[in-house]
Image (cartoon, helix red, strand yellow):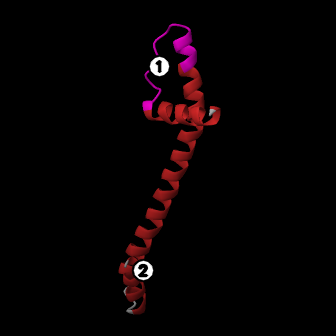
Amino acid sequence: MILHRIAEAFRSRDWFTFAIEFGLVVAGVFIGIQVANWNEARNEAAPEDLARLIDSIGAGQAPEPSVGWRGVEAALDRELAGTR
Protein backbone atom coordinates (compact mmCIF):
# COMPACT_ATOMS: atom_id res chain seq x y z
CA MET A 1 0.00 0.00 0.00
CA ILE A 2 2.65 2.52 1.00
CA LEU A 3 4.89 1.44 -1.88
CA HIS A 4 2.01 2.04 -4.28
CA ARG A 5 1.56 5.58 -2.92
CA ILE A 6 5.29 6.22 -3.20
CA ALA A 7 5.29 4.97 -6.80
CA GLU A 8 2.32 7.22 -7.63
CA ALA A 9 4.03 10.25 -6.08
CA PHE A 10 7.19 9.45 -8.03
CA ARG A 11 5.31 9.06 -11.32
CA SER A 12 3.38 12.30 -10.82
CA ARG A 13 6.62 14.05 -9.80
CA ASP A 14 5.18 15.15 -6.49
CA TRP A 15 8.61 15.31 -4.89
CA PHE A 16 7.48 16.62 -1.51
CA THR A 17 5.08 13.71 -1.00
CA PHE A 18 7.70 11.30 -2.29
CA ALA A 19 10.29 12.63 0.17
CA ILE A 20 7.89 12.50 3.14
CA GLU A 21 6.73 8.95 2.45
CA PHE A 22 10.25 7.74 1.69
CA GLY A 23 11.40 9.29 4.97
CA LEU A 24 8.61 7.49 6.82
CA VAL A 25 9.65 4.16 5.32
CA VAL A 26 13.30 4.73 6.25
CA ALA A 27 12.33 5.78 9.78
CA GLY A 28 10.17 2.67 10.16
CA VAL A 29 12.99 0.39 9.07
CA PHE A 30 15.41 2.16 11.42
CA ILE A 31 13.04 1.82 14.37
CA GLY A 32 12.46 -1.86 13.56
CA ILE A 33 16.19 -2.57 13.51
CA GLN A 34 16.68 -0.73 16.80
CA VAL A 35 13.90 -2.72 18.47
CA ALA A 36 15.38 -5.99 17.18
CA ASN A 37 18.83 -5.05 18.53
CA TRP A 38 17.35 -4.03 21.88
CA ASN A 39 15.47 -7.33 22.14
CA GLU A 40 18.59 -9.34 21.25
CA ALA A 41 20.66 -7.54 23.88
CA ARG A 42 17.92 -8.09 26.46
CA ASN A 43 17.78 -11.82 25.68
CA GLU A 44 21.56 -12.14 25.93
CA ALA A 45 21.54 -10.45 29.35
CA ALA A 46 18.80 -12.70 30.76
CA PRO A 47 21.12 -15.59 31.84
CA GLU A 48 23.41 -13.10 33.62
CA ASP A 49 20.39 -11.62 35.40
CA LEU A 50 19.32 -15.13 36.39
CA ALA A 51 22.77 -15.91 37.78
CA ARG A 52 22.73 -12.68 39.82
CA LEU A 53 19.26 -13.52 41.10
CA ILE A 54 20.26 -17.06 42.10
CA ASP A 55 23.41 -15.75 43.83
CA SER A 56 21.46 -13.14 45.76
CA ILE A 57 18.83 -15.67 46.83
CA GLY A 58 21.54 -18.12 47.88
CA ALA A 59 23.20 -15.42 49.96
CA GLY A 60 19.91 -14.65 51.70
CA GLN A 61 19.54 -11.23 50.10
CA ALA A 62 16.51 -9.80 48.40
CA PRO A 63 16.71 -9.78 44.60
CA GLU A 64 17.78 -6.58 42.91
CA PRO A 65 14.83 -4.55 41.66
CA SER A 66 16.56 -4.06 38.28
CA VAL A 67 16.06 -7.72 37.39
CA GLY A 68 13.00 -7.91 35.16
CA TRP A 69 10.76 -10.89 35.83
CA ARG A 70 10.11 -11.53 32.15
CA GLY A 71 13.82 -11.89 31.56
CA VAL A 72 14.14 -14.15 34.60
CA GLU A 73 11.24 -16.31 33.44
CA ALA A 74 12.73 -16.59 29.96
CA ALA A 75 16.14 -17.52 31.39
CA LEU A 76 14.56 -20.09 33.71
CA ASP A 77 12.65 -21.61 30.81
CA ARG A 78 15.84 -21.88 28.76
CA GLU A 79 17.78 -23.38 31.67
CA LEU A 80 15.05 -25.89 32.45
CA ALA A 81 14.71 -26.86 28.80
CA GLY A 82 18.45 -27.55 28.68
CA THR A 83 18.36 -29.85 31.74
CA ARG A 84 15.55 -32.06 30.49
> Which label belongs to residue 64?
1
Look at the picture and state if 38 lies above or below 1.
above
Magenta stretch, residue numbers: 54-69
Q: Helix or strand or loop: what does disc 1 sit on?
A: loop
Q: Is residue 11 left or right of residue 74?
A: left
| Residue 22 location (% of width, % of height) | 44, 74
| Residue 70 location (% of width, % of height) | 44, 35
Find residue 12 and report its image quarter. bottom left
Q: Residue at coordinates 36% horizontally, 82% vertically from top-left?
A: 5
In the image, residue 62 lies in the stretch drawn in magenta: yes
Ranked by sequence position, the earlier of labels 1 and 2 is 2
In the image, residue 68 lies in the stretch drawn in magenta: yes
Q: Looking at the figure, which quarter contains the C terminus?
A: top right
Question: Nearest the camera: 7 or 14?
Answer: 7
Which of pointers 1 and 2 indicates the residue nearer the eye?
Answer: 1
| Residue 9 location (% of width, % of height) | 38, 86
Predominant secondary structure in magenta? loop
Question: Nearest the camera: 75 or 20?
Answer: 75
- The answer to whether mark 1 and mark 2 are in CB contact below 8 A is no
| Residue 33 location (% of width, % of height) | 52, 57
**Residue reaching furthest top?**
60
Q: Looking at the figure, which quarter contains the N terminus?
A: bottom left
Tag 2 residue? 3
- The type of residue carrying mark 1 is Glu
Look at the picture and state if 58 lies above or below 76.
above
